[in-house]
Image (cartoon, coloured by chain):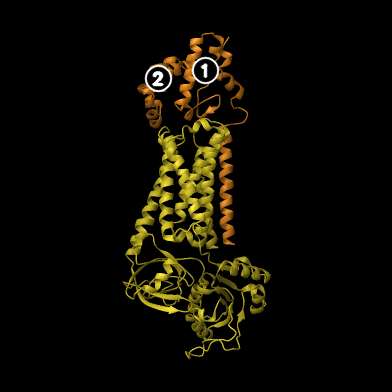
Amino acid sequence: MRQQWARIITLLTAILVILLSVIFALQQNPPQSSTPVVEVEKSFTPARALSESNTAETTLIASGRRIFETQGCTRCHSIAGKGNPRNPLDSVGKRRTAKAIRQWILAADELKAQLSTPTFLTKQAYRKLPEEDMNALVIYLQSLQPITGNP
Amino acid sequence: MKTVLSATFWISLYLLLVLAPLLILILGEVPPGAGFWWDFSMALGFSGMATMSVLFLLTARFQRACAPFGIDIIYYFHRYLAVLAVLMIFTHYLIIRIVNVDALGSLNPLEAPWHMTSGRVALMLLSLLIITSLWRKPLRIHYDQWRMLHIALAVTAFLLAMGHIQGINYYIEAPAKHWLWSGYSLIWVSLIFYIRLFKPWKMYHKPYRVTELRQERGDSWTLALEPEQPRRIAGRITGGMTCAMAFMPGQFAWLVLRASPWHVKEHPFSISSSAARQDRLEFTIKELGDFTRTVKEMQVGERAYLDGPYGIFSTDLHSDAAGFVFIAGGVGAAPIISMLRTLADRHDPRPLWFIYANNRWQDVIFREELELLKTRLQLTLVHVLTELPPELPPEPPTGPATGPATDWQGESGFITPQLLQKTLPPDAQKFEYFLCGPRPMSNAVHQGLKILQVPLNQIHFELFDLV
């Protein structure tokens, strides 16, 4: 009898937790107004690299992407739905200048107020990145343009 | 009615504690959505942690909060809820693992940020915690060692998981959330302080002395304890006499022998003495394990510590009952004899039945005293023996109440539904039933009482053997 009650309360807890978690997730991500996945995928295409036949730049973009992957950027950032969706970098090349991108990667002191302390501290590690890797990474991120923004 | 209200209050408080993080997430301001599964996973993770905080609260043995339910069921609930909490936390991880494995980063602790590693280690410790608790006996882990391990694993896993949350710092930035999580951590730190330091300190300042050690039948020993400094407690139950501990007959207490209260070595035992004589407490303990075997080595004058009383297995909680039926097996008679002694001391005129199962006649604990109680109470005593020797040995002349004559009047075999039907009167539905024995017996009795149409809420039992 009392054992039964313990089971019922546990089950009730499970149901309430799942229900409220679903409500929260739906409230955060209303089904109709969610960003169309198609556009995100398109923006992933380094469109500029395709349109310009600059092979040197294509190589740089490729090595920048590799650096992005090996440095574990996906832990906090996503591109085309790959990685942490909290801080998407899709179309970042349109939103930010090369200088700004560099400042955000390195957590420049003037951005300190905009970053949480753990984030600020984590980003300090990228100050040790070799200059050529840094360049490649910035060029890769700059290449992330919405497809519609290109001729 | 009062019990129902109080139970409702504690269940609501419990639900509020478990659901608070989710309610604050839903009602408060949060960063924009990150996909359904991502946010669902985060919500599960937070709820798992809130549930874990409640798990600590459940083992604090708060007498007031346990009273409406019975502390044995609180420990049962702790077990069910622990499995649920760990499932929530593992689902939190698995969803991210499936939906967005890139966000997890490197597994290598040298490369991964500390808060991801601490989350991973917490997951491993939690699995270990569940395995060692659900399968303690097959894994042959000693009870005392298991308790230390359990506390160490739980505390470490919880702290690591808290570090994981702090390190990621997602939803906890907003002030309300910051306060909420600080609140949970605070509850938790004060609980450790209360359970591990303050409560033992209270026990330490109320020491008891062993005043008698008596051998009983069936490898059992009765240990009598009296407070070192007799206290006079005025009150309804005690009536102003010196009091070892104000308890209801049938309740139990955690007993510490030959160790300090800080040593996490207390074991629960039923009080077997009469609640009408509260100047001393008796515990009747059968030699079954490592701890119970040491009871007989206790010397008169040695110190002991107690935490109690606990439990709702008591005739005093059903004082308006028409009569009581007690059903026990072996040393399960300890809380029953406490109730019978108390009823006799109070000259209770109500009809009573005691169906008492044992293996062998010579091992029937309290055998002689039960015969005496028959003269003081309206008691129908039915012995049930599994081993009935064809020729009963002549008992030494210690009185008329010893061994059965060759014309054995009791029952043989196990307690069956048929036996209950035969023993109990036709109006069996109006009595309160107290059941204390091994699981097969308990199941058979439940089945029998169902046939006799006894309502479930009139059947009371204590769940021992929790881990």
Would you name the residue on which mark 1 appears? A144
How many residues crowd around disc 1 within 10 Å: few (fewer than 14), some, or many (20 or more)? many
Q: Amino acid at mark 2?
A: Gln
Is B254 situated above or below A8?
Answer: below
**Reading the chain from its start, which is encountered first: label 2 or label 1?**
2
Instruction: Name chain B's colour.
Output: yellow
Chain A visual colour: orange
Residue type at tag 1: Leu
Residue in the picture at 62% in, 70% down: B445
Image quarter for residue B220?
Answer: bottom left
Badge 1: chain ID: A
Output the chain of dot 2. Answer: A
* Badge number at residue A103: 2
Q: Can residue A147 be seen here?
A: yes
- CA separation in Å, label 2 and label 1: 17 Å
Quadrant of the snapshot with the N terminus of chain A: bottom right
Q: Between residue B168 and residue B150, name the one nearer to us.
A: B150
Crowding at label 2, few (<14), some or many (≥20) Cα neighbours within 10 Å?
Answer: some
Vertical side of B362 occupied by A114: above or below? above
